[in-house]
């Protein structure tokens, strides 16, 4: 399946009735599918240009503080060497302004999956909505915005289904009132998607982590990826016709520990996992995938291995263990 050939059917039907104006916002009625988050075509048996399908990024320091703009710009300059698709989780810390500003200055040609955070109170939700609206309306940033996510793993964090759906509807309604028609969805662990959540989301974003599964066949990382692919194919069977599946998070820890995990965290296993997942899932199966994450999340509280999924070293901005980028891009056979 090629990414560019997937047709997205939007549940609200609003986006299907609009077209892109010269300013970048959808304004007038016409039947036309929305652009996909990752509009790329990759031959199934050829290694792609050395870019990952996607990567997540969070601009926080070790004490959970907001990184200054100069640090964000430095990190983003390294991230875009590895991917043309970036996922952000929120709009706090002026991250949309700083990240998108850097991308514009670097003349980046990729897309950003923009997130609205929903588990830190009403004021935070409204602030995120307002900031997302502002950047979409900014002519300098419009071209970067691919899609909007509302929350992350809400059911996993015991948020009721009706609250999740209500938040999606709230954001979509606000954007439409502003003349903005983009895909709006939630993000959930692959097993916890409900039919109602799927019906109300324009794209099905699923997080999946074989790292936290105790056993995978012969114990190899490739087998872990194959197991994840089977789970994703089962999820695809439940998705309403015409809606696209995107892996919104996946990755492998390089340090720390977990109560239940496949094997001890390891840098070489991370590289092997990313390479195998890129080949088997993103390229061969055509499922766009975001790898967690650009840098270690040392700011996360009460987390062990979860802090160490970063792909880049925060000091050198190279792969951990100073590995060559080629380890992530073997020829897919």
Image: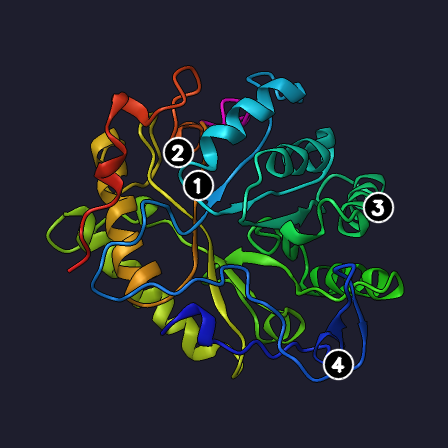
Whole-number angstrom distance, CA of label 3 to CA of label 1: 26 Å
Residue 328, quarter of picture: top left
Which of the marked residues, 1 or 4, is nearer the chain's N terminus?
4
* x and y, in percent, of residue 102 in the image: 62, 32
Range of magenta residues = 296-302
Q: Is the residue under label 2 in contact with that under label 1 (CB below 8 Å)?
A: yes
Element under disc 4: helix
Give 159 or 269, whichever is nearer the viewer: 269
In this figure, which residue is indicated by the disc labeled 3? 130
* x and y, in percent, of residue 89 in the image: 62, 43
Q: Residue at x 51, y 62 (%)?
A: 192
Q: Residue at x 50, y 71 (%)?
A: 244
Which of the marked residues, 3 or 1, is nearer the chain's N terminus?
3
Q: Residue at x 70, y 38 (%)?
A: 96
In this figure, which residue is indicated by the disc labeled 1? 292
Tell me the crowding category of disc 3: few under 14, some 14 to 19, or many 20 or more residues within 10 angstroms, Cα based: some
Which of the marked residues, 4 or 3, is nearer the chain's N terminus?
4
């Amino acid at each position: 399946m090629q990414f560019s050939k997937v047709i997205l059917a939007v549940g609200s039907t609003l986006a299907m009735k609009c077209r892109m104006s010269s300013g970048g916002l959808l304004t007038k009625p016409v039947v036309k599918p929305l652009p996909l988050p990752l509009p790329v075509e990759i031959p199934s048996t050829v290694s792609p240009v050395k870019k990952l399908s996607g990567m997540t990024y969070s601009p926080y320091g070790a004490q959970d503080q907001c990184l200054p703009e100069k640090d964000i710009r430095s990190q983003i300059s390294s991230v875009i060497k590895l991917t043309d698709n970036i996922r952000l989780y929120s709009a706090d810390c002026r991250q949309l302004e700083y990240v998108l500003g850097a991308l514009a200055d670097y003349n980046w040609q990729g897309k950003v999956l923009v997130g609205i955070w929903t588990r830190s109170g009403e004021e935070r939700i409204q602030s995120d909505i307002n900031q997302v609206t502002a950047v979409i309306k900014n002519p300098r940033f419009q071209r970067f915005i691919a899609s909007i996510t509302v929350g992350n793993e809400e059911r996993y964090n015991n948020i009721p289904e009706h609250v999740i759906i209500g938040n999606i509807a709230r954001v979509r309604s606000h954007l439409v009132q502003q003349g903005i028609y983009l895909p709006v969805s939630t993000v959930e662990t692959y097993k916890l998607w409900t039919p109602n959540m799927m019906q109300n989301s324009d794209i099905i974003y699923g997080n999946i982590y074989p790292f936290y599964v105790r056993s995978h066949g012969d114990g190899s990382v490739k087998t872990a990826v194959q197991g994840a692919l089977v789970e994703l194919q089962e999820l695809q069977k439940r998705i309403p016709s015409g809606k696209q599946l995107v892996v919104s998070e996946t990755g492998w820890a390089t340090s720390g520990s977990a109560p239940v995990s496949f094997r001890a965290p390891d840098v070489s296993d991370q590289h092997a996992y990313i390479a195998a997942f890129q080949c088997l899932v993103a390229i061969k199966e055509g499922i766009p995938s975001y790898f967690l994450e650009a840098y270690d999340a040392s700011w996360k509280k009460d987390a062990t291995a979860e802090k160490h999924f970063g792909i880049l070293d925060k000091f050198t901005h190279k792969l951990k263990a100073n590995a060559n980028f080629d380890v992530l891009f073997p020829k897919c056979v």
